[in-house]
Amino acid sequence: MARVCDITGKRPRVGNNVSHANNKTKRRFYPNLQKKRFFLPEENRWITLKVSTKAIKTINKYGITAVLKEAKAKGLAVA
């Protein structure tokens, strides 16, 4: 399963591990994804989304309905 946020579309980024001797080896920076259930009151059902912690804060601020509506407009949301 892909490590992609359902709301923000965040994906792993690529960078380098840099040692004290300045040797560089490739590494990946993963988004902080959590599997979380949200209740949709207008549909009277629960949905499970894989969201980043930043997306959880956004949902807490604006509400799941508004965030899903905006994400669908961008073509990102699964539900």
Image (cartoon, grey):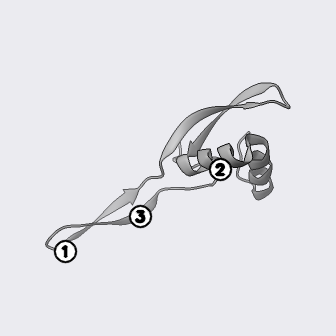
N-terminal label among 3 and 2? 3
Q: Which residue is mark 2?
A: 58
Q: Residues within 10 Å of mark 3 (few under 14, many from 20)?
A: few
- The picture places residue 73, in percent across and down from the top left corner, at 80, 55
Q: Residues within 10 Å of mark 1 (few under 14, many from 20)?
A: few
Question: In the rendered view, does 1 fall on the left or right side of 37?
Answer: left
Specify the amino acid type for callout 1: Asn
Residue at image position (19%, 71%) is: 23
- Position of the C terminus by quadrant: top right
Q: Which residue is mark 1?
A: 22
Q: Residue furthest left?
A: 21
**CB under 8 Å between callouts 3 and 2?**
no
- The picture places residue 41, in percent across and down from the top left corner, at 81, 30
Residue at image position (33%, 60%) is: 27
Q: Which residue is mark 3?
A: 14
N-terminal label among 1 and 3? 3
N-terminal label among 2 and 1? 1
Kind of element beneath mark 2: helix
Q: Residues within 10 Å of mark 2 (few under 14, many from 20)?
A: some
Q: Which mark is residue 36?
A: none
Residue at image position (65%, 50%) is: 58
